[in-house]
Image: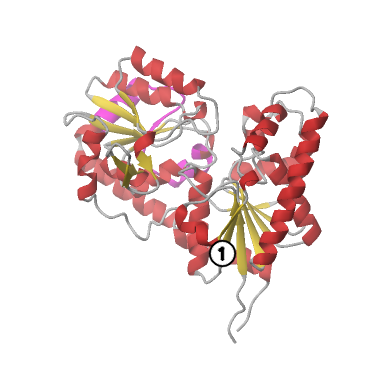
Amino acid sequence: MKRKSRNIGFVSTRFSGNDGVSLEAEKWLQLLLLLGYPCFLFGGDCDEKEQEYSYLVPEAHFKHPEIQDIYKTAFSAPTRPPEITARIYQLKNHLKQQLYTFTNQYDIHLLIVENALAIPLNIPLGVALTEFIAETGLPVIAHHHDFFWERKRFLTNCVWDYLNMAFPPHLPSIHHVVINSSASNQLSLRTGISAMLIPNVMDFDNPPPPPDEYTQTLRSDMSIAPDEYFFLQPTRVVQRKGIEHAIELIHQLDCRARLVISHASGDEEHDYEQRVRKYAELLNVPTNFVTEIIRDQRTSLADGRKVYTLWDTYQCADLVTYPSTIEGFGNAFLEAVYFNKPILVNNYSIFAIDIKPKGFRVIEFDGYITDHTVWLVKRILKDLNLVQEMVDYNYALARRHYSYAMLERRLQTLLMVCFGEERC
């Protein structure tokens, strides 16, 4: 007897870009499609290739003007103006009706909510999801990447009632998933909710292809001289990424090296980007911001310049810098390992608790660049045999702990919990 098709609906503010939530959602989506589950998307935006099975609602995006107005008031005003409360309820009702239409139109049997019930960038969407789940009892996997209590900017607010209600909600049909053990502990302590731990993954069973002809011009297009080392900072320009540490490292190396930053500031303030630019000028460290020529797909700009993918930049880098002070997990860490690159890592808490104990060989520092850090980077840049030994070891280790095979086993367990044991 053939198994009845079970349609799965993904819900997020967006399914586009190189942010960690979008990247991991794409991995879950592709794996579930391979397992035979038809999948559909509900959000404010998606990549072009996913539009045919997407249900787009502009108000679901956290950058929608009305959602932005609510967000700015919610996390700046000491008290909540009545008109903001009214607008939250109006948008909540609209989004909830859209969720009903989406699940009915595509005959959805299970929702997978990507961070929309964890980070309150879109409060009406979180409240709408909570009410929708409470009213329908539909099985839900809530995939939490980071919680509001982990970000300082969310702790002063006038929306505690909504945060306690929906970020995340405590409902019997929701199965919670977190990406690190600290989040699991805090979720239990703060809410009494238990969660499954599923870390971020890469397809380590299928190594990346070698650099091709397209990438031969990447270094020159990014103004990297032939005699310069290419240090890649593959993150957004936000304060918790600690980019000044990478600048300080290059300043102390006493060799020709250039820092290339792949992403823009994103949804956070731009003051830190100005701080990074001024700091690089002060220390006379060549630093390139190349976000305009980094996209999800290779293409070209109107002026004829080539556009590269983030994967292309990894292929060409000499060293990856990852000096973050706070991370939900560490996508850039796994990506550097996947592309066989040595990596500089600040000893951020999730790395120290979840990743480091597995034995990865990295250039590690703890809060500030030391003479030993500088010495080790110099040694690695000059010793290609040592680099090869490090990256081969890290790849084999990551394949054991952070592969698609691990993700598939845990998703199969969750699906069995949601749908029951299905027998042929």
Residue sitting farthest toward the front: 302
Instruction: Residue 48 in the image: state x and y as whole percent.
Output: 46, 54
For image coordinates 29% across by 22% down, the residue present is 286
Asked which quadrant contains residue 137, the reply is: bottom right
Number of numbered callouts drawn? 1
Residue sitting farthest toward the right: 82
Residue sitting farthest toward the left: 226
Residue 192: tell me if it is visible: no
Between 194 and 81, the one nearer to me in the picture: 81
For image coordinates 41% across by 46% down, the residue present is 334
- Span colored in magenta: 351-380
For image coordinates 45% across by 19% down, the residue present is 274
The residue that disc 1 covers is 39
Specify whether 298 is left or right of 36. Answer: left
Vertical placement of residue 260 versus 252, above or below: below
* Quadrant in the picture for the C terminus: bottom right
Instruction: Residue 284 in the image: state x and y as whole percent.
Output: 30, 15
Between 57 and 257, the one nearer to me in the picture: 57
Specify whether 403 is left or right of 60. Answer: left
Colouring chosen for the image of the structure: secondary structure
Asked which quadrant contains residue 10, the reply is: bottom right
Asked which quadrant contains residue 364, the reply is: top left
* Quadrant in the picture for the N terminus: bottom right
For image coordinates 60% across by 43% down, the residue present is 61
Q: Amino acid at mark 1?
A: Cys
Magenta stretch containing residue 378, yes or no? yes
Magenta stretch containing residue 390, yes or no? no
Specify whether 14 is left or right of 242. Answer: right
Q: Secondary structure at mark 1?
A: strand
Instruction: Residue 269 in the image: state x and y as whole percent.
Output: 54, 25
Vertical placement of residue 124 versus 287, above or below: below
User: Is the magenta region chiefly helix, strand or loop?
Assistant: helix
